[in-house]
Amino acid sequence: MNSENRHPSPLPKLIAICGLLLLFILAVNAMRVIEKRRRPTPTHNLEVRETNTQPLPNPQPINAEPKEKNSNSVRRRDVLTTRRGPDGFNLYRYWWRGGAAVYVAEMDRNAEDLKFDVELANGQILRRETVSSATRRLKRKGIQSIAGVNGSFGIREDNWGRGGMIFNLHIQNGELVSIPKLINRWGYSPPTPWGETSFGVTPDGEFLMDAVQLNGSFHVGNDTLVIDAINQICDSYCPVVIFTPRFGRSTLTRRCYEFTLKNLTLPITGKYKSKFVVTDVNSRGNSIIPSDGVVLAIEPRLARSWYKKITEFTKGELEIALTPKKWQTVNEGIGGNLRLLRDGRIEPELVRFNRTRGGSAIGHHNGAQRHPRSALGFNDEKLFLIVVDGRQPGYSMGMTLYEMADFFNDIGVKNAINFDGGSSSALWTLGEIVNEPAHGYERPIFNVAVIRRNDE
């Protein structure tokens, strides 16, 4: 067949159609980004009451590196209101000059009708739950939450079934639910004042922010065994762990020597002393945790010098005293992994971390990159629950840890710790998530820092 009798190739038309379709998709996405930046918070209960386009007052000098940018990093602040918002509570959206949207829930510390609280996902350590689900569950118990933010770090899933296990301190209604050993494992918790910091509230309303130490001991006869942690992983890094009913059905350990302790007072608290009797000895691990007792797990190498000393019906005493001493009376406490601000000054370790672009603490290298973040802060007048949106080009790219600390100082936060971030970052207020999580939906988390109505 001659070439002039062939049908024209459809390929050029197909390429042209695909090109037009691609241009159309890009144009639609660009319009969505522009609209996203212009619109108020995408919730039907919230509205922008006013917009502050004037720079906020310049902050006091801090012991950080000289900055090339303007010392004030706030481009705009939107005051978000709700018809059901109580007195002493405010919600703001800040636009950071570096390219991020920051949502801040503020509680007046003098507001008699409001208080800080924490909630463990699903009421136990194993498994996770969204912030929205946790607040709905609290409502069914008669507790009205005003705002909540995702809190501590932990294990999402592993092949031992430990998904949901918290790596940080958690104190709820005075019960010491979880406390780790302060070790530098996986680059997670540097054993310095910068790392493994917790926030707590004493019965008289004092706010604390410290690295908290367990100081636990197990006494049998004339022998004493140091307890490293509560409801944490038992291994060579952390060889002696107490598992309470808050952990779950069983300890999920492997090859640990375990001793079931009963006839003791529960729950365990920050200042604790109780007699016990051993009711079961298990050399294989993964013991069932009784509802009226605890399980003492000892890593195999250390257990060799103990398993002959402890048998069924052995009696002894369990003792715990948190330090700093003020933490012994804390009613509500929650841990993060790094301290950002102390008395209005950026932590010196964080300044070095920023200068070396993450090189001074390589385990936290993603902290030198811009990501979604969550945090808790306070000053003499207010408590702040904060979420930084990120990973959304054209809307909000997130912040580094240093940028977040610098920004917090600009808006009046004096003390702050970093919570779990990334796709977990979610700020809930009066029925809705007010920020825009990185994946477009809420991710199940380990525990929640809550502002709630004070019904006492």
Image (spheres, rainbow, N blue to C red):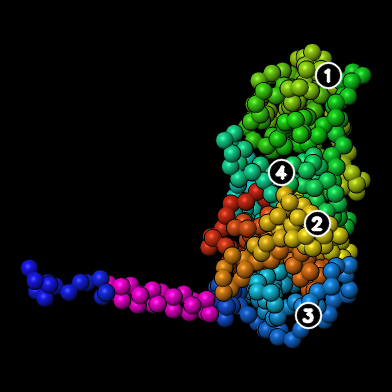
Provide the residue designation for mark 3.
Answer: 70
Provide the residue designation for mark 2.
Answer: 339
- Circle 3: residue type: Asn
Q: Which residue is at a point 86% across and 52% down the rendered structure image?
A: 193
State how far apart marks 3 and 1 are (Cα). Answer: 65 Å
**Are dots 3 and 1 in contact, CB under 8 Å?**
no
Q: Pick the residue in front: 185 or 78.
A: 185
Q: Which residues are magenta?
A: 14-35
Say left or right for 315 vs 77: right
First along the sequence among labels 2 and 3: 3
- Circle 1: residue type: Lys
Q: Quadrant of residue 292?
A: top right
State how far apart marks 4 and 2 are (Cα). Answer: 18 Å
Q: Which mark is residue 186?
A: 4
- Badge 3 density bin: few <14, some 14–19, many ≥20, Cα 10 Å: few
**Are dots 1 and 2 in contact, CB under 8 Å?**
no
- Circle 4: residue type: Trp
- Badge 4 density bin: few <14, some 14–19, many ≥20, Cα 10 Å: few
Q: Is residue 144 visible?
A: no
Above or below for 436 versus 327? below
Q: Which residue is at a point 86% across and 60% down the rendered structure image?
A: 348
**Are dots 1 and 4 in contact, CB under 8 Å?**
no
Say which of marks 3 and 1 sits in front. 3
